[in-house]
Amino acid sequence: MIKGFKWAVTTVLLVGIWSAQGHADTSAAKPAIASQIDALSELPNWQEQVLSAERLLQHNELGPVQRAATLTAIGKIALESARYDMAIRYFEQLESLSRSEQLSDSLYHALKMQGISAFYQGDYAASVTDYQQALSVAEQRDNPIERADIHNNLGMSFIQIHDLEASLEHYLAAYMLYEQYGNEQDRADMLLNLAGVYIRQFRYDKAEELLKRAMTLFERLGDQYGVALAQGNLGVIYTESNRPELARVAVKAAVEYYHSINDTRHLAFEYVNMAKLSLLLRDYTTAEQEVNFAMYYAEKADNQAGVMHALHPTARLQLMRGDISAAEVSIERGLTLTRKLGDRLREREFLHLLALVQAATGKMQAAAETLDHYRDLQFSLLNEGLITRLNKYQSKFEESQLSQELAKMKQAQELQKLQDEQRNQLLWMSGLILCLTLISVFAFYHRANERRAKIELSKKVAQRTAQLQQSADELRNANQVKSQFLANISHEIRTPLTAILGHAESLQQDYAHDAHLVSSLAVVTRQGNHLKDLISDVLDLSKIEAQRFELEYTEFTIENLLADVCDMFQRPCMEKSLALLVENDLPTPYLVRLDYVRLKQILINLLSNAVKFTHHGQVELLIRQHDDGLIFIVRDSGIGMSQSQVARIFECFQQGDNSITRRFGGSGLGLSLSQHLAKMMGGEISVHSEVDKGSQFTLLVPCARLSQGSETGEEAHRVEDALLPASEIRLSGTVLLAEDHDDNRALIVRMLQRMGLEVDAVSNGRQAVERCLSAYPDVVLMDIQMPQMDGLEALKLLRQAGFEGDVYALTANVMEHEIKDYLAQGFSGHLSKPINRELLYQTLAKSLQRTCDAQALDLAIDMSDLKQSFAQTLEQERYKLIDLWQEQDWQALQHHCHKLNGAASMFEFVHIADVASQFEAALKQQQTALYQDLFLILCDELKVCSYSEQFDVT
């Protein structure tokens, strides 16, 4: 079935095409011309239709669009009337008329209809040429359905000339397009066409299955034409598979439908099939009638292929009845048509009959030549299929497998050839094997050389990689040694410096009456503190370079930070007669979560430089809100800097120039450290300066406000209570404290009782679980690392037992990821050591009730006795540290450092807490190279602090 060529559908399509394309010209033409074009199909006979069309084509006022519509209409009428030569002639004129518009609808349909006309005429080679031109136009028009239709028609033409490979290729292309853009009708047509390919390949089972599926779809669509086509093909299958009864039923059903629509072309082919079936049953009388019908309808349809197909059973019938001369005439006529139409499969069948006729008439030499011709044609058809399959197999199999397949396929041909051809084939195969052997040897040699080259290259790459890795390790070790040296030397210098400052301060108190000595001691103290600050900066930079520096985020208000910083610079500004101006544009209170100590350190460095380099005028600190966070601006009216000085101001150990160091002093570490800290917070410091006009440093710190100043009513009141712990508000409730360090526990109990709370204190996690489940306190403060049971395990047991009260993690672990982990484990919040009294009050106030009484609440407590008690244990802590080191019990040593870090932080032994925290982190990360250095430093810190406390020089 030709895709898209069902007459009713074609009529609608053609009328729609020309009405859409030529609307402008048609509207301009005379009504008489348009009416005559529309009336062509209504004229009673073909002669009148042709004469009317020719008169229209000669009309002087006929425009291009009307001419195209006339040619299309008369060409369609000729095709419907089976006058294929006339149809081709009119569609060729339409093609010439449309060539000026390469992608027009008229050009595409002219080429397509020429192919359809040639196909129905039986000239399949000409139809292939026309369809290929139509396909080229359809691909440029980018219409998927048009491309699918032409691929489908090409498949049908190729199958008629027995080019099954090309037919399958085009059917596959059509199928893929129909699957994406087509409908159920398209899929039914594809099943029908694919079945035709399987019939040609003698795969009757598969073809029958596809035809039955296609018939089901056609019946559902109400497409009787498609059903008749499927029945005709089923008749062929039943005939070839020796099921004559089913074959006759199927073919008769198809014939009845074709008679109902007067389809002479298909009637010719179906009567041929019926004649073959009758010959198979030896019913020569019926076969003669059916052959005559087939020839009649083929000639009536002007279908050369139909005539060719009818001549074959005619010649067979004549041969079986002994009419040799008539059979020979039919065969010669059939051979002429097969060669004209390029149907080599039918040519082979006629040659077979011709050899029998010649043998029957005694023409043995001619019969032998005909058989040779038959055999050559048979081999040609066979070889074409073999070569096509060989090309496919070549890309799928290895050379050895392909050689075996070739040998098997060649053996099938050698059985049908003469002995001399067998010897030639053997020689050819030997040559092929020799060539393959040479190619294999060459490939093996080339692969061996390539493998050796790859091995050599791999060795060189590995060697070079090892050298680079060694260099990287050496650089990394050198950097680590440098950083470790800076850390060690900073600690080594700070240890005796602490004793020096302590003794100097003690002597200042003892000899306060000696003004000269007090002045000298003040110089010692002042310079010692300067040296101490310098060492702290070096230590911080070494930590940053060693990637062991981490920020400690806490919640605080910007107002408190500004008050703390500005208090430090009131006196230096007064001494130099400078005005210190602070402009805070933020809403109050402004609560944020940042590293308070490091942000304060940055502001101190910036303000310190501003005061240092300003002789007269003022120093300004401005705080503004930004989309990404906060902006701190430090502006002065000092000496300023040039652009070259600004370019290197943030480098380590660099100042504007050497004269600045001589005039003002300083190490050049402050701004470099400040920039490092700002970047760790996600921000940056920028500078703008002019010589003799002053400098402006701008610090951008990303952060979000935790509470809004626009809150009103009860919410605003709660914010004030949380941020400003009113001295008249006390708390009521019970608190369970789990802390394993005795002095820490006593200090925290004293804080909680100061707030008016009842406190129940335990020393490990197991006791904490027992007390919670028996007393049910309002709040639990839980240390993390404790003996017998740690805080995480205790919290898990409490939650499993149904305790729903607030449980806060109380620990010296203050890293951001550690806090997030505690919250993920189920803690209600986190309190870091050393404990901030204000933050502790704010946290507990969220869970406990406030009570007002006459007694004022003062959170300040005296912890001198507890501090002295802890100091007296420092020597014991050192001995225990040494014992654990000698036993190499790293787990216990880590726990001991954590415990020491928490206690030292609580009682403001900063240096001990710092080193203990570093040692704990190194043990946790198994950085064995740092163990010994940190162990010795921590032992020295414990010894110096213990010594200093005994003489009260801290």
Image (cartoon, rainbow, N blue to C red):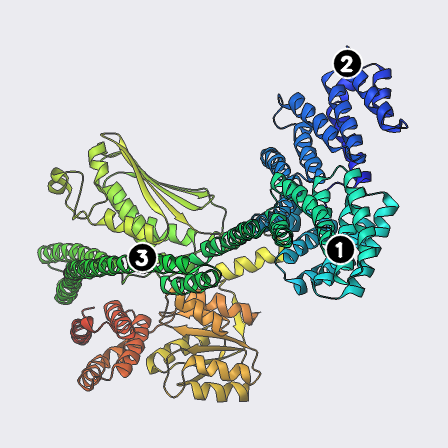
Rate crowding at label 1 as few (under 14), some (14 to 19) or many (20 or more) other CA atoms within 10 Å.
Answer: few
State the CA–CA distance, disc 1 to disc 3.
52 Å
Q: Amino acid at mark 1?
A: Arg
Residue 735 vertical placement versus 107 (above, below): below
Between 548 and 896, which is closer to the camera in this rendering? 548
Q: Residue at x 66, y 25 (%)?
A: 95
**Which residue corresponds to mark 2?**
58
* Residue 857 seen by the camera: no
Residue 920 shows up from this direction = yes
- Depth check, front residue: 856 or 953: 953
- Identified at 49% across, 59% down, the residue is 723
Residue marked by disc 3:
431
Distance from disc 2 to disc 3, alpha carbons, whole Å, reads 69 Å
Q: Which residue is mark 1?
A: 321
In the drawing, does residue 233 fall left or right of residue 757? Answer: right
Query: Height in image: 540 above or below 139?
Result: below
Q: Residue furthest right?
A: 44
Q: For the C terminus, which image quadrant?
A: bottom left
Kind of residue indicated by mark 2: Gln
Residue 605, position as x, y percentages in the image: 27, 48
Of residue 533 and residue 418, the one placed in the foreground of this image is 418
Q: Nearer the viewer, mark 2 or mark 1?
A: 1
Query: Of callouts 2 and 3, which one flags the residue occurring earlier in the amino acid sequence?
Result: 2
